[in-house]
Image (cartoon, coloured by chain):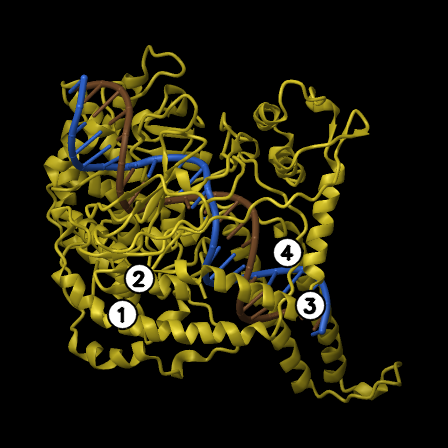
Chain colours: A yellow, B brown, C blue
Amino acid sequence: MAPTVCLSDGDDEDGPISFKRTASVKSEQEDDSEDEKPLAMRTTRLTSNASSTSRNSIKRRPGDSNTGTSSPLKKAKHSAIEREPKAADAHDNKIPLAPRLTSVKPSKTKPPAKNATKNKKKSPSSFTKDSQKGVEMKAKKTVRNSRLSKAMKVRQGSGSGKKWSTLEHNGVMFPPPYMPHGVKMLYNGQPVDLTPEQEEVATMFAVMRDTEYASKETFINNFFTDWRKILGKTHIIKKFELCDFTTIYEWHLREKENKKQMTTEEKKALRDEKGKREEKYLWAIVDGVKEKVGNFRVEPPGLFRGRGEHPKMGRLKRRIRPNDITINIGKGTPVPVCPIPGESWKEVKHDNTVTWLAFWNDPINQKDFKYVFLAASSSLKGQSDKEKYEKARKLKDHIDNIRVNYTKDFRSKDQVKKQIAVATYLVDKLALRAGNEKDEDEADTVGCCTLKVENVTCLPPNKLQFDFLGKDSIRYLNTVEVELPVYEAVKEFCAGKNKGDNVFAEIDTIKLNAHLKELMPGLTAKVFRTYNASVTLDAMVAIICNHQRAVSKSHDSQMAKLNEKIDELKVQRDGLKAELEKAKKGKRPGDDKDGSRKKKLTPEMLENKISGIEAKIEGMVITKNNTEESKTVALGTSKINYLDPRITVAWCKTHEIPINKIFSKTILEKFGWAMDVGPGFRF
DNA sequence: ATGCCGACTTAGTATTCTTTAG
DNA sequence: CTAAAGAATACTAAGTCGGCAT
C-alpha cells in the first residue's frame, strides 16, 4: 500500500509522522538565531500552513493484518530498536516551507491519450509462472546482495572515473520487422495501394486516432510531411484532408479485440515465447556479478510523442538498425552477436569510464543519444543513488550558512550576486529546477534561471505569483509570500523588460551551480530538491515538487459512485433509525403493517447496525476526500527519486511494518542498498 | 566565458498485472 | 466467473550537469 496523501484541513499533529514534527520543532528551538530571518519566516509559513498538514498513513487492507507477520526485516528490527537510542540528530529539518501549490494542468498543453478502450483479462494460470519467477529472482538477489555490499565498499568512488573492470552482455534486442496487414486506406474515397513501408507509417497514424495528438495541427503536419517523403513526389496522396484512415483504424480495433479473445493458454504461450526470446538480454555481468539490464529493447519506430507544444510532435521516429548502435563491452569479452543477419554494429567500444552498454542517436534529435543502462537494481545505479542521498544529507550541515548567505546578498550591489541569491532562494524555497537553456526546436518550458518576466507577477506588498510551464510542460502555478528584499529584487529584475526576457538576465545554471559549489563541494541546484523532499518526507513532497498526473478518466465517475453509495447508506441508516424509534416505543417489529417481516430486531441489534453503517459512511467520506485531493498528485515520483529510502526503512523498522507494504518489488530491488540501515537512521 | 557534446537522472504516460466488486 | 479498479512496471521524453574545445 502506498502512503496516501491526505490534505484535509484540520487534520493534524497526531499522524504517524508526528515524530517528524516533534523533531523539527525541537530543532528550531535549538537553533541559534543568527539566521533568524529565513527561519522565522519559514516557521511562520509552516505554522500558517500547518492546518493543511498532510500526513502519511499506512493503509491496511482489511485482509492484511500484517502486524504479526514475520518478515526478515521485522525480525532484524527488534534487537536493533532497543539498541538505538533514537536520539540526537541535533539540528535538522528546517521544514522547506512548502507552500501549497495550486498546480493546474492546462488541458491545452497536454496531449494526453484518451485511449478509451481498456480491457484486461487475467488468467489464473499465469500465477504459476509469475510466482516462480518471483522466487527465482529473490534467490538471485539474496546471493547478489550479500556479495554486493562488499563489492560496493571496495569499489572506487565514482570520482575516480572507472566504473567497472569487466563487462559482459548480449547487446540489444530489436523489435520485430513490420508485418503488413494489407488493409487499404481511402484517398478521396478510393482505396489506395501502399508499400509496406508506406503502410507502416500510415498505420502509426491511424492507430492514434483517439489520442489528442491526432487532432493537433503540428502533429498532423509533421506526420504528413514525413510520410510524404516515404510516399514519394509522384504518389497520388497529396493532401491530408483527403486521407481516410478509418479502415486501418478499424483493423486495429479488430486486432485488439482478437488479442483480448485469446484463451489463457494462447496468451501464456505467447508470453513464454517472448520470455525465451528476451532471456539472453536480461542480464549483464559486471565485475563478475550478474546484474539486471534495464532497457535492452531498442525503441520501435513510431510517431514522436513530445509533451506539451513540442514542435516536433508527429515526426517519424525511424527504425533503428544495428548500424545505428554502438556497443560498450569489456575488452577481451566476446562482442554480442548482431541479431539481424547480414548487418552489423556501428561500433564496439571498451570504455570503462561509463556505465552504458549501448547507445544510438535519437532519430528525432540527432544530437541526442538513447542509452541502454543497467537496471535500477544494479550495484552501479544503487551506488550512485546512495551517493545522491549522502550529498543531500551533507547539505544539512551547510543549509543554515547558505540561507544566511543568500539572505545577505538579496541587497547586494553586485547584480550578479543579487540574482544568484534570489535564484538560490527560489530553488531552496520553491524547489524550482535549475532551468537550463533550451533549443528552439523543443517545447517552450522554463526553470529558475530561464524564468521569463511574464512568468512572475509581483503582488504588493510582498507576494510573487508564478505561472509557467516546467519540465514535461507541467504548469507551475503558485503564489508565495516572500521576504520583502526578494520581492523588491524580483520587481527590479523585471523592470523595463519585455515579454520573453529573462528575469535572471545576468545568470544561468552554470553560474548558479558554480556558486553553489563554493558553498559546499558537489552542491548543485537539484540537490535542494532531494534535500527538501527527504527532509520533509511526507505527502507534502509530491506537492512541493509539482509531480503531477493526469486526472484519471474514471475520476468523476468514481466520485459519483462514492457519493451514490454514501447516499444509499444514509437512506439505509435513516430507515433503521426510524425502525429503532418504533422498537423503542415498544412496538414489536412484527407489529409493523408489513406483516411479512421475518426478522425480529432488538433495539440493540438495530443500534449496532446503525453504528456499523455510520462507520461505513465515515470511511467512504474519507476515501472520497482522499480521492479528490490527491487526484493530480503523483507520489510515486518522489518515492522513487527524492526520498531517501533509508528514512522509510528505518521508520518501518521502528514501527515493525514490513517494508514490502511500502515498497513494491521493483523499488525494493532498486533500494537494496538501503535495507540494512538501523531503525535509528535519521536523514 | 561560451557552446556543444555526452552521460546520467528525473518524469509523466502507456501498458500490463493484480486485486476487488459484483 | 468477469469486469472494472488499482497498483506496478515499461517506456521513453525531458531534464540536469560536467567536461572539453574554442
User: Which is more N-terminal, label 4 or label 1?
Assistant: 1
Spatial CA distance of label 1 from label 2 is 8 Å
Between A406 and A614, the residue placed more toward the observer is A406
Query: Residue A341, percent across and down?
Result: 46, 48
Query: Could you give the CA–CA distance between mark 3 and mark 1, rounded to whole angstroms?
Result: 38 Å
Contact check, label 2 and label 3, Cβ < 8 Å: no
Judge depth for marks 4 and 2 and give the one in front.
2
Locate residue A222, reporting x and y percent.
56, 25
Disc 1 marks which amino acid? Arg
Counting residues from the start of the chain, the first of labels 1 and 2 encountered is: 1
Foreground residue, A407 or A9?
A: A407
Chain under numbered label 2: A
Asked if the residues shown at circle 4 and circle 2 are in contact, with their CB atoms under 8 angstroms apart, the answer is: no
Which residue in the structure is indicated by mark 4? A558
What residue is at 29 percent from the left and 74 percent from the top?
A142
Q: Which residue is mark 1?
A: A144
Disc 4 or 2, which lies upstream in sequence?
Answer: 2
Do we see residue A95 in this rendering?
no
| Local secondary structure at mark 2 | strand
Q: Which mark is residue A291?
A: 2
Q: Residue at label 3?
A: A263
A683 left or right of A543? left
Answer with mark 3 or mark 1, whichever residue precedes in sequence: 1
What residue is shown at x 22% (from left), y 49% (from top)? A94
